[in-house]
Amino acid sequence: MRRHYFLDEYTIIAAERGKRPSDFKHGGTVERSNPKTCPFCPGNEDRTPPAVAVYTDDGVFADGEERVKGWWARSFPNLYPAATPSPGTPTKEWVADFARGYHEVIVESPDHEGNPSSFSRRDLHRLVSVYRDRYIRRISESGVEYVSVFKNWGRVAGASLSHTHSQLIALPVVPPALKVEMDAITSAPRCPYCSFVEREASTERLIFENEKFVLIAPFSSMVPYETWILPKDHVSDLGGIDSRGLAEVLGEALRRLDQLLSGPPYNYMIRQLPDRRYHINIKIQPAISIMAGFEKNTGIFINTVPPEEAARQLREV
Amino acid sequence: MRRHYFLDEYTIIAAERGKRPSDFKHGGTVERSNPKTCPFCPGNEDRTPPAVAVYTDDGVFADGEERVKGWWARSFPNLYPAATPSPGTPTKEWVADFARGYHEVIVESPDHEGNPSSFSRRDLHRLVSVYRDRYIRRISESGVEYVSVFKNWGRVAGASLSHTHSQLIALPVVPPALKVEMDAITSAPRCPYCSFVEREASTERLIFENEKFVLIAPFSSMVPYETWILPKDHVSDLGGIDSRGLAEVLGEALRRLDQLLSGPPYNYMIRQLPDRRYHINIKIQPAISIMAGFEKNTGIFINTVPPEEAARQLREV
C-alpha cells in the first residue's frame, strides 16, 4: 500500500503478473458522429449557444447576432450547465447557492476528426493558450473562487460528443479536495510539490521532461498508466505558465498514452489556484479501469499496474 | 449545490428536464458464463482456493483436503488479493505495509443464475447472516482495524464473474474516508446519523421503512438513484444488527432498483466500525453514470436526478 506524496490518500498496488497494455480492453473512443449534424463543426455554429470567445487568426471575438466563422477554437456556455450565472433562489433547507458560476464548452479544433494525441505543435500551443485565456478571464470574475478545466475523451470517460472538446466550470467556492490540499501545503515547511518534483526527476517514474516540465507516473498512481504533468519551477496557475513548454509535454503525454494503449478513453484535469502557495498540476487518467465497491467504500484505490512499470512502458513508446 | 448531511462533500443537482429511468442506458449485467466452467458453481469447488467458511444446513465448515459440498454459501481467499496475511517486506521508501490483511470472495448462492434482487426472504437472511459472520470473524483478528464488505454486480460495476458474489477486505488501518467521518462524528453534539435518520423518515426522500431500518435517497446523492440503508437505532456494526430487518430492507432496495432501471449494474458498500460512536450504513450506487473530469478534478459530483424524484419513482415501483 502506498501513500500519496503529501496527502492522506492511499493506493494498493496489486500487480497481476504478466498483465500487458493490450490486456486493458476498452471500447475505444472512436464513435464518430456525422460532421453534418455535429454542433461543434464549422457551419453548425448556430446549433450552440452564442460563443463567449471565438479564436481566429484575426483575434478573439464573441458571437453577436451572426456567428463568427473561420475559427480555430471557440468557447460557449454548456447547454446542460452544472453552474450558471443566475441559479435562482435556494428554497430548501441545506441548499447552498454554490452552483452560481459558469460552465463552458471549449471546442479545440474545427477538425471533426481532430485528436489531441496527434495535434501539431501549433495546435497544442493553441490549446494551452485557449485554456490559459479562458482561465484568466473566469478567475478574474467577481465571485469566482475556483476554475476547473478538464477534458473527457471518449464516451466511457464522459464525453457525449466525439468532436474534440474540453470544459471549464467556474465555481464560487474552493472545492473540498483543493482545501484539503491547501491545508497540507500550508503546514509543510516548503512546497511539497516542489519537493517531490525534484526527487522524482531522478527516479524510474520519470517519463519525459523538458526545460520547464516533468511528466511522471506518480508513486501512488490511483489508476493504471496515470501520469502527472508538473512545472519544475513553482508556478500556481496557468497565468504564470510557460505555454510552449506545457504544450510540448502535454503532447508527449497524450501521444504516448494513445500509442501504448491503442487510443484509450481518458480524462485530464488541471488543478490550479490563484494563490501563490499552490503548485499547478495536470493529472491524466486513462478510463480503462473500474472504480468498484472497495474504492467507493474506503477511498483507497487498487491499481494493477505499478507506476514504475507504467513509466518504463511509456518511456519506451 | 447540496452538502452532505455532516461532511464537507458536495453534489451539484443538475436535473435534465424530462429525463426518465429508461434514459439511463446500460449494457445490463447478464453476461452469463457457462456453469460447467464457473468456479463459483457447485461441483467446481476445486477451482477456487480452499474455503475458509462453507455454509451448509449442518453448520459452517472450512475446506480440508476434500472440498465441502452441499453448501448454500462459501467464502474463500481471492486469487488476486488486494490484501494478504503475508505481504512480504516493504523494500522502498514511502511503502507502507498496509496491505497486510485478508481478501475473501463470498459466493452467495449455489445458483449460477441467482440474482439478489429476486432472492427469497430466506436467501436474503442467509446473505446478511454470512456478512455478519465473516465480519465478526475478521474484525476480531489481531491487526485488523477495518473490514470492507461490498458487492459489485455487473461487469461495469467491477464484477469479473457473473455468478453472484460479494467481497470482504480486512485492512490493518482505518481508511482515510472513515477517519474523516469519525472526526465529524466525534465533534458533533450527538450522532449525526441518528439525527438525519430521524428527520429523513418524514421527508419525500424516504423510500421504504420497517421497524428497524429506513431506506432513503440521500439529500446529496452523488449518483442517480443512490440509496442508503440505515438502522433507526444507533448500531455501529453488523455485530449488533437486526438481521431479519436488514434482510428485508436490502431485498426491497435491490428489487426496486432492478425493476425501475431494468437490471442495472450497481455497487453496495457496508460502512461500519467496531467503535460504539459509529452508525453502520449501507450505500447502494447504480453504476449507470460516469465519473468524469469534473468529479476527478474537484471531488464534487454532478447528479442529473434529484433524490426526491428518485425516491418517488422507487416508492412507486
Image (cartoon, coloured by chain):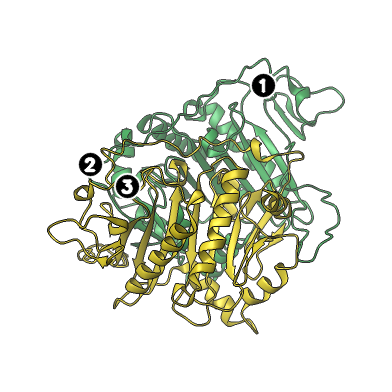
Chain colours: A green, B yellow
Q: Position of residue A41 (x, y in %)?
A: 67, 21
Identify which residue is drawn at 50% across, 56% down: B268
Tell me: B48 left or right of A90. left
Q: Position of residue A317 (x, y in %)?
A: 32, 32
Q: What is the CA distance from the residue labelled 2 to the residue labelled 1? A: 42 Å
Residue A74 or residue B13, whichever sits in front = B13
Give the residue pinned by disc 2: A18
A284 shown above or below B232: above
Q: What is the CA distance from the residue labelled 3 to the residue labelled 2? A: 10 Å
Identify which residue is drawn at 53% across, 59% down: B250
Q: What is the CA distance from the residue labelled 3 to the residue labelled 1? A: 37 Å
Label 1 CA crowd tier, 10 Å (few <14, some 14–19, many 20+): some
Q: Quadrant of the N terminus of chain B?
A: bottom right
Q: Report helix, strand or loop for mark 3.
A: loop
Residue A164 or residue A154, whichever sits in front = A154
Q: Check the residue under mark 1 and report the chain it is in.
A: A
Quadrant of the image occupied by residue B25: top right
Q: Is residue B238 visible?
A: yes
Q: Amino acid at mark 1?
A: Cys
Q: Position of residue B312 (x, y in %)?
A: 72, 52
Q: Report helix, strand or loop for mark 1.
A: loop
Label 2 CA crowd tier, 10 Å (few <14, some 14–19, many 20+): few
Residue A186 or residue A75, whichever sits in front = A75
* Residue at the farthest front position: B57
Q: Which mark is residue A305?
A: 3
Give the residue pinned by disc 1: A38
Q: Amino acid at mark 3?
A: Val
Instruction: Say whether mark 1 and mark 3 are on the same chain.
Output: yes
Q: Position of residue A48 (x, y in %)?
A: 75, 28
The disc, 2 or 1, on the residue closer to the chain's N-terminal end is: 2
Instruction: Say whether mark 1 and mark 2 are on the same chain.
Output: yes
Quadrant of the image occupied by residue A93: bottom right
